[in-house]
Amino acid sequence: MGIITRGFFGNRRQKDDENAWRIPPGQYLERGFPVLSAGPTPNVDTATWTFRIDYNGEDLGVWDWDQMMALPQTDVHTDIHCVTKWSKLDTDWRGVLIDDFLADAGIDEPPEFMMAYSDGGYTTNLPTADVIDGKGMLAHTFDGAPLEPSHGGPIRMVVPHLYFWKSAKWIRGIRFMDADSPGFWEAYGYHMYGDPWREQRYYYD
Ligand SMILES: Nc1nc2c(c(=O)[nH]1)N[C@H]1C(S)=C(S)[C@@H](COP(=O)(O)O)O[C@H]1N2
Ligand SMILES: [Mo]
């Protein structure tokens, strides 16, 4: 019993060392999946859910659940990093790339900035370049199962190369803007961009 236990933890430690290069500065390896929400979990019904892309209030595209599911579906295997210092390795997401929404709407040259907004009022700002070319998606499936409501189900944004607060849960739309503008946490002093590899946690980082 004692030998089996030691061997088991020994292997885990070795794997942790091999993966150390994947953990950005100031982060620790988390095996669970913490929930971080600024408010209560909204009850989002896929029967009435829509995803909207607009530019200064003018609609460029609107999809209901079935139309979203009819778009190309993409699997993404990636690491995620929360500003509260946990990193989780090897997460698996399935959903629709932002590229595929833009292609479906015929948007060739999107404006430079965007605000993602959610049921419940959460917002977060991103440069459009950081969600296109395969870098951002809407995910409805996590580790092969429907995304849990507490983690943003039925559908959330996932932009894994930035701190996870940029990955809006319960996403309802993205609004294109010509100039950058702070979202919810950014207005409270979080960084406007949020690159975990440069530790851009707070406004002046
Ligand atoms: N709508 C919404 N999206 C959100 C949040 C939130 O409070 N509301 N929290 C953000 C933060 S700070 C983080 S770290 C991640 C947490 O996602 P998780 O709860 O699935 O770990 O979601 C982000 N997206
Ligand atoms: Mo966070």
Image: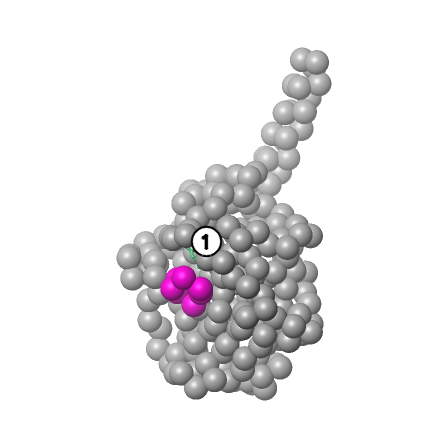
- Of residue 98 and residue 62, the one placed in the foreground of this image is 62
Judge whether residue 66 is colored magenta.
no
Say which quadrant the C terminus sits in. Answer: bottom left
Q: Amino acid at mark 1?
A: Thr
Element type at marker 1? loop
Left/right of residue 178 with respect to residue 145 in the rendered view: left
Residue shown at 69%/52% (left/top)? Answer: 144
The magenta span reads: 117-123
Q: Is residue 94 above or below residue 29?
A: below
* Residue located 62% across and 81% down the image: 104
Residue 196 visible, this angle: no
Q: Kindly identify the residue that appears in the image at 67 percent across and 28 percent down.
A: 11
Residue drawn at the location 60% of the way across and 41% of the way down: 19
In percent of width and height, residue 94 lies at 65, 60
- In the displayed structure, 117 sits above or below 178; it is above
Query: Where residue 66 sits in the image (x, y, percent)?
Result: 65, 72
Residue at numbered disc 1: 41
Taking the image as shown, residue 195 lies to the left or right of residue 89, namely left
Determine the residue located farthest toward the top in the rendered image. Answer: 2
Q: Quadrant of residue 138?
A: bottom right
Q: Quadrant of residue 45?
A: bottom right
Count residues near mark 1 (Cα–Cα under 10 Å), then give few for <14, some for 14-19, many for 20+.
some
- Looking at the rendering, which quadrant does residue 49 occupy? bottom right
| Picture layout, residue 200 above or below residue 111 | above
* Left or right of residue 101: residue 168: left
**Quadrant of the image containing the N terminus:** top right
Report the front residue among 119 and 167. 119
* Residue 173 appearing in the image: yes
